[in-house]
Amino acid sequence: MMRDQVPLTGIVLSVFPIGENDRRLTILSKERGKIQVFARGCRKPNHPLFGATQPLIYCEFMISEGRSVNYLNSAEIRDTFPWLKEDYDSICYSSYFSELAEYFTVEGMDERNILNLLFVTFKAMEKRQISLPLIRRIYEYRILAFYGIGLEVFSCLSCGREEDLNTLSIGQGGVFCDNCRDKIGDTRLHPAALTPALLYALQYVAAAPLNKLYAFNLTEEVFAEFAWIVRHFMRLHVDHAFRSEKML
């Protein structure tokens, strides 16, 4: 039994073919968080929903909610993000960002933080004021923080001191001051020396408003250190093989 029609606004994260002409969409929406929706007949090129049922399309949808199945009735495209498909690199990175969003989000939960993060990330890709590899590491670091897996980079994990933070333990999840760095313990847990520029980058990405998240750049040396930290932190906390990451 179907309920009344429900309006949704969101981004199509992924599309899966069903039968000969149907698709199952995973939509990240403002109103329902992540939701699975079936679109009947939309794989036909002349179908009115053909364009709106592609990956990485921002639409206003009208769906019918059922107890176990949701169906798409209509859709109005608001943005197609054409720059995400302009070249191979853009396709790979945007696919990876959407796959991460789909992996971390939960159906029925309020996921507006991730939806907004996707928006500002896509806009950063359009502007290209910073490199795609840096956008990737910023996105990874921030999406982990949204789920409570962020690094403690503002005070010493041992004594709470906010000055002389010069050592990071990825395994223990945060920074240590000069007086406490000998308490890190197991040195196999990815310890890293922190320069002021690297510490500032970690703090900035953790706390910056989303509309300013990509409003900075790093030198080649600091980026290499920042990327190393985020890569190891991801590997430590995310035990999943992302298909799109292999393309990167």
Image: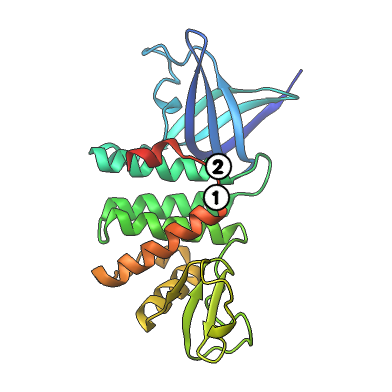
Describe residue 220's horizontal placement relative to residue 238 as left or right: left
Secondary structure under badge 1?
loop
Q: Dividing the picture into quarters, in which one does residue 148 lie?
A: bottom right
* Quadrant where the N terminus is found in the figure: top right
Amino acid type, mark 1: Val
Q: Residue at x 35, y 79 (%)?
A: 197
Image point 48% across, 67% down: which residue? 190
Amino acid under disc 2: Tyr
Q: Secondary structure at mark 2?
A: helix
Measured in 3D between alpha carbons, the distance from the residue under mark 1 to the one under mark 2, in whole angstroms, is: 10 Å
Image position, residue 248 (x, y; %): 32, 43
Q: Which residue is mark 1?
A: 238
Q: Position of residue 199 (x, y in %)?
A: 42, 78
How many numbered tags mark residues here?
2
Give whichever of 228, 146 is nearer the camera.
Answer: 228
**The label number, if any, that marks residue 103 in the structure image:** 2
| Side of 67 where 154 appears, left or right | left
Pick the residue in front: 239 or 220.
239
Please, which residue is most extreme toward the top here? 20
Q: Quadrant of residue 65?
A: top right
Q: In the rendering, at what x and y percent does residue 80 appear?
A: 36, 37
Q: Residue at x 41, y 11 (%)?
A: 44
Q: Is residue 92 left or right of residue 31?
A: left
For the residues bearing labels 1 and 2, Cβ distance under 8 angstroms: yes
